[in-house]
């Protein structure tokens, strides 16, 4: 095709009514073809991609198909996008069957639906099994489909109790919807009796399903928007090495390390420690200078590569975020057993949550974030500092997510692990990274206190946060600490009067 007729990504996204980010995501997920023409600083796309993107968006918004189903349908039709125009019945396929045939099948062993779950579903009349001659159960096709879907949810990590509790809630809501539907139908046929009654019933059922699907999508979007509106992004941003302590608190330690470096100018350990130390006071430019020295002599050092990417991500340089993220993803992909790389990749995905308004993309990023975090935990290193770092990252990420499914308690346990090993860590840091405890303990103290507030333990939070006053903190940490102390002091009406007033000195 003539290059002049091809479209830049900005032109393609404008014509299709999406963002360039969405175009790249669709390509990454195998929903769109790769650029028709590509060179170092430019990619050009076939104009047909406009209609292809519109077909995908229509299948999402009007037929409520998840992207995994859309991709399977496109693969099975050899990318005939017209199949999406008639996709309301999932092309006549059981969605569980489509999900089972994904290119990366689950590694978990399929487990049968427990008898007590079958009994519960039967009691709720969600399934209606029949007994055969050998006292076994025979399930109709629709029942088998529901059981298959529940089994797939369980296979992918959902607890049976959670599934049953969810079905209880859904049943209660459906009962209310059906009561309204019943009243509406009675009113309709009383005012307009018709010979085409079954056509009317089918129309009503389709309309109701469409309304429910649209209401669900809107409610999900509103909940995600509310969650993101309440996010304190500066709170997560301090996952970059802190900006908590004043420079003079750790300056003597850094000066001592620099004196040692003069006699050992190529010492990678010393250079990395100095890079970490200057990041603790927010001097990322100086950190990058030390890392640049390592890159010249040991370009494959993993710690250096991760920190180089991470500090550049926060150093204020624009236009490099996508490239840096790709570099970190590639590092994780080629070094899957390096847990620190995976932990920092988890934080990056947590940051990305703020950049999307799409509920499905939000949940995808949450899933990627936790996937990398759990991989880092599974490959927990022997080095005590790296262990503490992974626990700290876990606590921070769990605080960032909506408070459900016990994640706040899990985050607190991660912070508590660090606190329980304080003596051992201090002994470790007396030999290596002597500056680090002066950053770690005030930060840990603050975030443990915030976690206790979020789970409603205001007295414990108050005690922890007041201890933070002994540290010399940079703004805005000092103000944030005082605000948190006040929140903890007044948060529990039954104990607030017994707590001393805020120390304003």
Image (cartoon, rainbow, N blue to C red):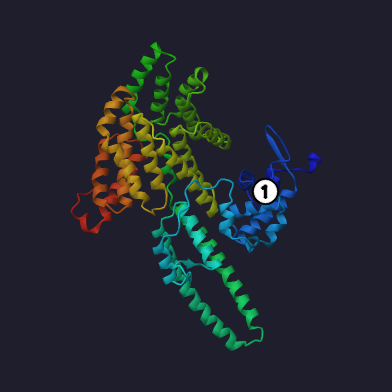
Q: Could one spot residue 372 in this view of the protein?
A: yes
Label 1 crowd bin: few (<14), some (14–19), many (20+), radius 10 Å: many
Task: Name the one closer to the observer, 96 or 341.
Answer: 96
Q: Quadrant of residue 490?
A: bottom left
Image coordinates for residue 107, horizontal then vertical, percent: 49, 46
Q: Quadrant of the C terminus?
A: top left
Q: Quadrant of the N terminus?
A: top right
Image coordinates for residue 152, horizontal then vertical, percent: 50, 55
Residue sitting at x 21%, y 58%: 494
Task: Name the one closer to the observer, 163 or 107.
Answer: 107
How many badges with numbers are in the image? 1
Q: Could one spot residue 62 in this view of the protein?
A: no
Q: Which residue is mark 1?
A: 13
Residue sitting at x 41%, y 44%: 397
As drawn, 406 above or below 93: above
Q: Quadrant of residue 414?
A: top left
As drawn, 144 above or below 273: below
């Amino acid at each position: 095709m003539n290059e002049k007729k091809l479209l830049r990504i900005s032109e393609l996204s404008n014509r299709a009514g999406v963002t360039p980010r969405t175009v790249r995501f669709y390509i990454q997920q195998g929903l769109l073809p790769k650029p028709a023409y590509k060179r170092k600083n430019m990619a050009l796309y076939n104009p047909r991609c406009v209609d292809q993107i519109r077909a995908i968006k229509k299948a999402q918004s009007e037929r409520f198909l998840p992207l995994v189903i859309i991709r399977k349908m496109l693969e099975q039709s050899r990318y005939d996008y017209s199949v999406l125009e008639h996709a309301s019945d999932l092309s006549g396929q059981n969605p569980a069957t489509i999900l089972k045939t994904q290119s990366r099948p689950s590694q978990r062993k399929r487990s049968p639906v427990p008898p007590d779950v079958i009994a519960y579903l039967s009691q709720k009349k969600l399934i209606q099994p029949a007994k055969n001659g050998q006292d076994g159960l025979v399930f109709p096709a629709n029942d088998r489909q529901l059981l298959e879907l529940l089994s797939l949810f369980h296979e992918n990590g959902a607890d049976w109790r959670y599934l049953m509790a969810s079905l209880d809630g859904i049943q209660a809501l459906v009962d209310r919807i059906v009561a309204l539907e019943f009243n509406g139908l009675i009113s309709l046929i009383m005012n307009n009796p018709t010979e085409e009654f079954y056509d009317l019933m089918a129309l009503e059922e389709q309309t109701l399903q469409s309304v429910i699907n649209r209401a669900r999508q809107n409610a999900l979007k509103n909940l995600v928007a509310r969650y993101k509106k309440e996010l304190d992004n500066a709170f997560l941003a301090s996952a970059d090495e802190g900006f908590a302590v004043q420079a003079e608190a750790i300056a003597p330690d850094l000066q001592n390390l620099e004196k040692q470096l003069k006699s050992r100018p190529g010492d990678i350990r010393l250079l990395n420690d100095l890079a970490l130390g200057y990041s603790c006071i927010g001097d990322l430019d100086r950190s990058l200078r030390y890392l640049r020295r390592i890159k010249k002599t040991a370009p494959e050092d993993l710690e250096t590569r991760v920190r180089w990417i991470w500090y550049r991500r926060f150093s204020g340089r624009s236009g490099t975020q996508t490239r840096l993220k790709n570099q970190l993803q590639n590092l994780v992909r080629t070094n899957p057993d390096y847990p620190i790389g995976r932990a920092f990749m988890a934080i990056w995905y947590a940051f990305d949550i703020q950049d999307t308004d799409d509920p499905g993309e939000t949940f995808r990023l949450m899933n990627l974030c936790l996937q990398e975090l759990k991989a880092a935990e599974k490959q927990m290193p022997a080095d005590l500092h790296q262990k503490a770092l992974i626990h700290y990252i876990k606590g921070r990420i769990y605080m960032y997510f909506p408070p459900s499914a016990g994640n706040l308690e899990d985050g607190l346990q991660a912070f508590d692990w660090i606190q329980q090993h304080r003596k051992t860590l201090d002994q470790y840091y007396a030999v290596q990274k002597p500056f680090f405890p002066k950053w770690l303990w005030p930060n840990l103290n603050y975030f443990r206190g915030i976690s206790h507030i979020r789970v409603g333990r205001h007295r414990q939070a108050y005690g922890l946060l007041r201890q933070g006053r002994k540290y010399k903190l940079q703004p805005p940490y000092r103000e944030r600490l005082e605000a948190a102390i006040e929140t903890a002091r007044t948060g529990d009406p039954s104990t607030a009067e017994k707590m001393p007033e805020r120390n304003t000195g």
